[in-house]
Image: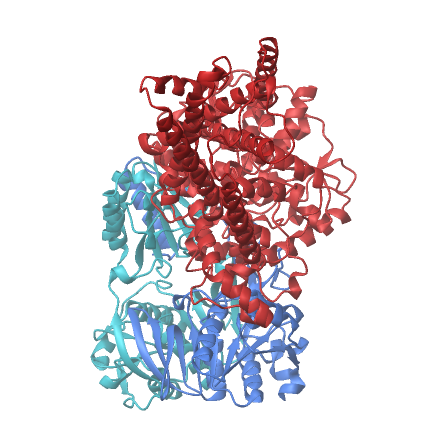
Chain colours: A red, B cyan, C blue
Amino acid sequence: MPDPTAEQPQQQQTRTRAWWGPAVGLSGLGLYAAATVPGEVAGREIYFNVAHPWAVYVFMAALVGLMVYGAIHHIRLWGIGKPTPGLLREIPHRFSNALRLGLAQEKVRRDRYAGIMHWCIFSSIVVLTLVTAQVAIEGDTPIKFLHGTYYLIFSAYGDFFGLVGLVGVGMALNRRYFQDFHRIRWDERIEDHLIIVGLGLVLISGFLVEAFRILATELVQHPDWAPWSFVSYAIARGFTSFHMSEPTILSMHIASWWFHIASAFGWLALIVFTRLDHMFFAPINAFLLRTDSPGRLAKIEDIEQQEIFGVGHVQDFTWKQLFELDACVRCGRCTEVCPANIAGQPLSPMHLIQDLKGYLADVGPAIQTHQHQFGDAGREVSSVAMVGEVIKDETLWACRTCGACMQECPVMIEHVPTIVDMRRFLVMNEARIPATAQAALENLETRGHPWRGTSLERTTWMEGLGDVPIFDGSQEYLYWVGCSGSLVERNLPVTKAVFRLLGESGASFGVLGQEETCNGDPARRLGNEYLYQILAQQLVETFKAKNVQRVITNCPHCFNTFKNEYPQFDGNFEVLHHTEFLSNALQQGTLKATHPVSADVTYHDSCYLGRYNNQYDAPRQIIEMVPGANLVEMQRNFSKGLCCGAGGGNMWQEEIGERRVNHVRSEEAVLTGASQVISNCPFCIQMFEDGVPAVHPEEEGRMRPFDVAELLEASVFGKP
Amino acid sequence: MARNILVVGELVGGQPTPTTLELVSGAAGLAAGGNVSVTLLGTGATAAAAACGGAGTAYASDDAGYDTFRAEQWLPAVEAALDQANPDLVLISQSTPGRELGPRLAHRRNTAVAMDCTSIVDEGGAFKATRPAFGGNAVATYGFATTPAMATVRAKSFEIAGGAGPSSTVALPGAGESRTNVTGHEQVVAEGLQITDASVVVSGGRGLGAAEGFEMVEALANAIGSDKAAVGASRAAVDLGWYPPSQQVGLTGKVVTPNVYFAIAISGASQHLAGCSGSKVIVAVNRDADANIFNVAKYGIVGDYKTIVPAIIEELKKG
Amino acid sequence: MHLVVCAKQIPDPETPPSAFRIDSATNKVVPAQGIAPVLSQFDGIAAEAALRIKEANAGSKVTVISLGADSAAAAIKQVLAMGADEGVLLNDPAFEDGDSYTTAKTLASAIKKLGDVDAVFCGRQAADWDMGQVGLLIAEELGWPVSIIAKSVGQDASGLTIQRVVDDGFENVAMPLPGVVTVSNEFGEPRYPKLPQIMAAAKKTVTQWKTDDLGLAASEVGAAGSRLKLEKLSTPPRGVAVEIMPGDTPAEQAAALVAKLRADHVI
């Protein structure tokens, strides 16, 4: 049975529908108000009972001044960073990101409760700011419009959104104080209480001001207008039972008015000092968000001319990366989904970003002064090393580059490139690498593959398959087997399966055999950009020399590298992961899955096919077309899938921490009760091969890991 | 053709080492009636010579100055023996002394030595030395352009044949000077033998079923010899906390290249094989006949390690 | 101090056995397709040992010498990238196919030519032929003391202090300089080169010396001067399939196994 809480692949329509509700509601309200319009023109005295309303503008000037100061301070800090290339490309796409991810908060809504809560607060603040602005315009400019029908509607929606805001505040209070909800407490600060309690006070005092005014005026003079301000009206009606005298009411009114103004401006001032700044930084960061694939790491241009490699000092980040640090709201979503963190390993993306942010605040001003005076000469302004002390080496190495943090981040922080930038510094500048990762890199350098000690050759898998066509430029597809597909015993059956299926489908294809070399992905993820560039350039040249146009890969890491990263080296090829090709072939009928494979199977989304390349459907379609195979989803799937633990070069590293990531993921797979866990990635399969027996020691009835191609092979050709 | 052969012997605790006796026996076989002589240096050398069955002459010095091996002290003594014995072939153990003596002696006698040989034959009057090369991927056979031919020989390359000891013993001079000075010596007990250095590695895997299974694995290593065998573990076993990470064999652990690698209850995941595939001989003991380890093993026993391993230990004790 | 590292480029020891081929006509290893030669691992460790001594002695210099063909420059560059200062390639067709003796004689001639060398660091053996002679023979050629199979190398007023691996443990040795040390894998992994050093190394020129530069005659080096003659190089018969020990009882199977292992001279 499919898990009902699992994410399903249809999420699009709700957004447009969300706008219909308020629009219809507001029009209805307008019609109703117009129909019941009273004889007298409705309206109210702005600044009723307020002696020195101009003082508001003093508050406002102070607030603006503070904000300008804050902005200048921040901009100068970000300014110590390096230029951010490509920000002016694809402006329309960037605006669309700002609207979709910033204004419409698509990421915030990935946590449903938080999404509703945040939308309540957000919409309330936006509408109430407009309400206040209208009051100011009516009171302090010659423009007069707050009367008649519109005044009544204005009163109604003002109260409505005040109430919405309180609902949001209530939800926030509930989560913070009454629920066992961890992630928001991983880095809880006093400001978090201030923000939420403060907002509550602003909203409540707003209602009180309105209630006392209604009590003093409308309830007596225009009892038919008063109910339009339905919340304040109800409060005012409640107050009538206290039988307050008019002077008391007026004193209460003026007291609550000033309290409301003071608390509102005080709360707005929090924007400068607290994470409330996200109301600006989040949409701006959405605008700044990369427009290309998240699977593409930045290329270090002219690498041989560089003096420093990667980021070892805070000023070596781009200013966009520094900006991102300030956008972080400490919500903990990144850390909550981080596989390293889940396994109790020394990485929390949120703390990493916050530690960098704190470090920037500490050393940034001094760096700024030094840069001003000495140019780059004043690099070392702090005795505390950013890489190694503020951010520990093992923290950087624990990252799987799985992208789950970036997928969840509601303010669009890109953690992985920042982590890889620091790895680049560790590897290329400092040569500080875990021994096993170093061995993998050395193996890449000397042997062109990361599998130290393999006893297999690139052609071993071909044994017993008859004539394996070598790609010579005449075939349509290059079938790229990859290092794992040819040099790791467990992955050979997958390579053979894909090979047989390609043949069966009638595809025109060839392989490179001995001429394959690593495309550089592990080097790039482990931070050796130099080695990566050498390998990538060589391979792009090989592909061009052989007239490669279309590539089918075994491995999602190869797939991502060819598809998203080789264009940086002028290598533009049409790249398919084998699941994409096989799914197409099934749909076109060139392959027929006829033999039943009766089994409950669960499917594991690899990070580089799923999150990085948005391919969730093709592998599932294949599974669904295999007769007898019943797909049982895991709790974490699709874009919320959990990494197998091998990404980011961790295939070749010793893990530090409480658990192994692959044990955690294997446990989740075993929990489905399926007899097979199906993946699309040679690393994932190796990780499950290792992880499943660890969490399920009984050999009897133990789940077995397979590639999608192996499952399909059994169905197309029948069990051997 | 009768050949004179000189064996450079070594003493441990006043007795010739087993390899010394093997070399003397081997030399007796190769000498074809020629004279076999042996040099012995250090406390008890003269008395120990009698144990060298098959040797005709012993060259010995009882000087305790030889007890700690220093090549520069040994070399003049062995050269003095060479001057008198005038051998066609010099055989030396592939041991700590032999590794250093072989090349230096050869250089001083203007000849050459073949190191780490597994067999020496006389082929029509010319000695040929055979030794593994390229990590066991190749076997090389050498001839000698100069005399005497010299070889350092791996233990157990010849059988000890016994026979009468030397009929005469010639005294060698006492120990002289050495520029290098031995300032300390640390005898390493079994735990100290690193799995990367051990000539035999006995490894256990998840199939042992429990941490206690390693007791049997250790027993096998001890039966082979604590100076030779070390205990390893698969990543799975280390992960389960059954054995310390320092002993992990595999891609992310240690890469070992022993003469024999025993994989006890190890399935043979590729990451593990990466750490042991350089072994000369892999022996697999596994209940599962389809286990991947059998694809790389030279010898296999299909069965429960709990019965197989004690049987191997018994058999070794008979040896 | 002036330290010399002798570095050899060898066929990759991790070449899969199935790709390892020998040309029986020439008794040479056929380079496996797509598998580049590498720096012998022990020589990388020797370089690490030398670099640590260099770093402990301000103003010291490390020169790396390799005897080999043009491709061996890569091995030299690798050691330069680790931090060595200069590289010398002894590259002459006359040097080819020598034995340990001619190799050591040629290297020693180069060390003499350098003149002011305090210590020579070699790997305990080249990971192809595994003879373990060259360091010792260089010492004999130069008339220097030597200590082999070092696990650690330190310094005191009178020279180097070496802990070396011996059959039953470790031995501490004091060796005056100039002298020769051969370094074993117990020393630890060589460093991973930093990219700026890799790039600096790439720009360095490697000095090339031939027989004439070393004052050697072609007849005394390479194959011509060799004393040990390789007569046959072959691949040992490789068991394609596992040999399952016969026997109905564990005792019989164990007996069969132990007999096999003894016959192989491996235990």
Farthest top residue in view: A35
| Left or right of B21 in this view: B127 | right
Looking at the picture, does residue B309 appear above or below residue B227? above
Total labels: the figure holds: 0
> B207 or A297: nearer the eye?
A297
Quadrant for the C terminus of chain A, please: top right
Residue A72, given in percent of the width and then of the height, sits at 56, 55
> A156 or A3: nearer the eye?
A156
Looking at the picture, does residue B228 appear above or below residue B268? below
Residue C17 at least partly seen: no
> A520 or C245: nearer the eye?
A520
Quadrant for the N terminus of chain A, please: top left
> B180 or A650: nearer the eye?
A650
Residue A255, given in percent of the width and then of the height, sits at 39, 34
In percent of the image, x 58 and y 13: which residue is there? A33
Residue C2, given in percent of the width and then of the height, sits at 50, 85
Looking at the picture, does residue A655 appear above or below residue A425? above
Residue A536, given in percent of the width and then of the height, sits at 66, 52
| Left or right of C78 in this view: B186 | left
| Left or right of B304 in this view: A288 | right
In terms of image quadrants, where is residue C155? bottom left
In terms of image quadrants, where is residue B106? bottom left
Residue C205 at least partly seen: yes
In percent of the image, x 59 and y 50: which residue is there? A320
